[in-house]
Image: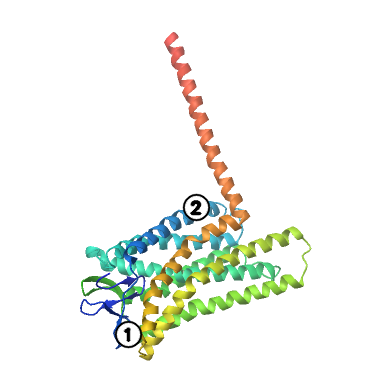
Amino acid sequence: MDAYTSYPPYYYYSDIENSTDYVFFNLNVTVECPGSPMHGSNIFMPILYYLIFFTGFFGNLFVILVVGSKVGRGGRLVDTFVVNLALADLVFVLTLPLWAISASQSNYWEFGPAGDLLCKLSSYIIAVNRFSNIFFLTCMSVDRYLAVVKLLDSRYLRSSRCIRATCAAVWLGSMVLGIPSLVYRRVEALRGGLSCVEDNNSPFFLGLSLTMALLTFVLPVLIIMLCYGTIVVHLNRHCAANPRAEARRRHSLKMVLCIIVAFVVSWLPFNVFKVIIIGSQLSNVDLSCDFQSWLRNGLPVSCCLAFINSCVNPAIYFFLDHHFRRLAKNLYKTCIGGQKSLQSQNSSASFTNVGTSDSLGRT
């Protein structure tokens, strides 16, 4: 990467007069530090993006087909959140081929006249996915809390109408919170070509980004921890009268908890990097060369780790959720049965047509 390296969706690096001295461009630093981005990233980054794209696309599409067939028709209420979560991940992974192409071209954003629109739109989708994911996971945690701790007092809150309204509110809120990505993201002509970057010269935007990082990650994680802490205390204090119902509750609880842990592990490094970078920009702190090198090499890793989360949830459903496997098995049997029925009908029709032809011929 001779000119600069852009790591979606937020940061890039710039070279100094075509030398090997690199400086973290988005930070307000005055010290030029030797070093370069990770070698071979223009090869393994596109490969990783395409792997995430294919596994995330087919995995989340499979989840939508399997679970969506039962939503509102005898399925679990939590499955409504599962389908919406899979839909958010499915829309997000559709943007990864753009970043894969950019990464293979030394991270230049060369998409012709539509380049600026694709830059804004893909960044907006990434932001909406990040917000909707954490909000849906928070809703799933609150739903588990109501189902276990407040079962008798939450009939309205856990009704299908209320859950659908909650999902609509989550989508609307995520789309509104993602608007800054449309306003402050654009294609700029930098040394050697075009780049899809954010405008980090606005203190208002930096303060807004820091506030969003805290309100859309730290606060939801605290709510999730509070819900699960209360659930664990409740389950330890009360013995269930129905062991089978208690086992189902614990199983659903374990599945949701695994999804939440996967999200936190995936997105925590990225949010840590973002808070450090924004804090350094707002305080005008000059960072040491070692720290800049750590940021330069850690940013692409944290981005990839965050993106991997979009293809992890289908694996969690398949390996940990017996209900999901049963639905998938029933859907498979239905498809196979439909194909066999269609084949038998075709065979019967073919036999009848042949018999009729023979009869007509004999006649």
Name the kind of residue labelled 2 in the image: Phe
Tag 2 secondary structure: helix
User: What is the quadrant of residue 71 in the picture?
Assistant: bottom right
Q: Where is residue 170 in the image (x, y as percent from the top left)?
A: 49, 70
Q: Where is residue 284 in the image (x, y as percent from the top left)?
A: 35, 90
| Number of numbered callouts drawn | 2
* Residue 27: numbered disc: none
- Image quadrant for the N terminus? bottom left
Say which of 107 and 146 sits in front: 107
Drawn side of residue 94 relative to residue 214, left or right: left
| Residue 210 visible to the viewer | yes
Name the kind of residue labelled 1 in the image: Ser
Drawn side of residue 289 relative to residue 218, left or right: left
User: Which residue does the image show at 46% across and 12% down from the upper left?
Assistant: 359
Say which of 140 and 106 sits in front: 106
Q: Position of residue 350 (x, y in %)?
A: 46, 24
Tag 1 secondary structure: loop
Residue labelled with disc 2: 62
User: Which residue does the image show at 48% across and 28% down from the upper left?
Assistant: 346
In this rendering, is residue 295 above or below 99?
A: below
Residue labelled with disc 1: 202
Number of residues whose C-alpha sits closer than 10 Å to that of mark 2, classed few (under 14), some (14–19) or many (20 or more): some
User: Which residue does the image show at 57% across and 63% down from the upper left?
Assistant: 161
Q: Position of residue 182 (x, y in %)?
A: 34, 73
- Image quadrant for the C terminus? top left
User: What is the quadrant of residue 2 in the picture?
Assistant: bottom left
Say which of 37 and 360 sits in front: 37
Drawn side of residue 129 relative to residue 191, left or right: right
Q: Is there CB contact under 8 Å for labels 1 and 2?
A: no
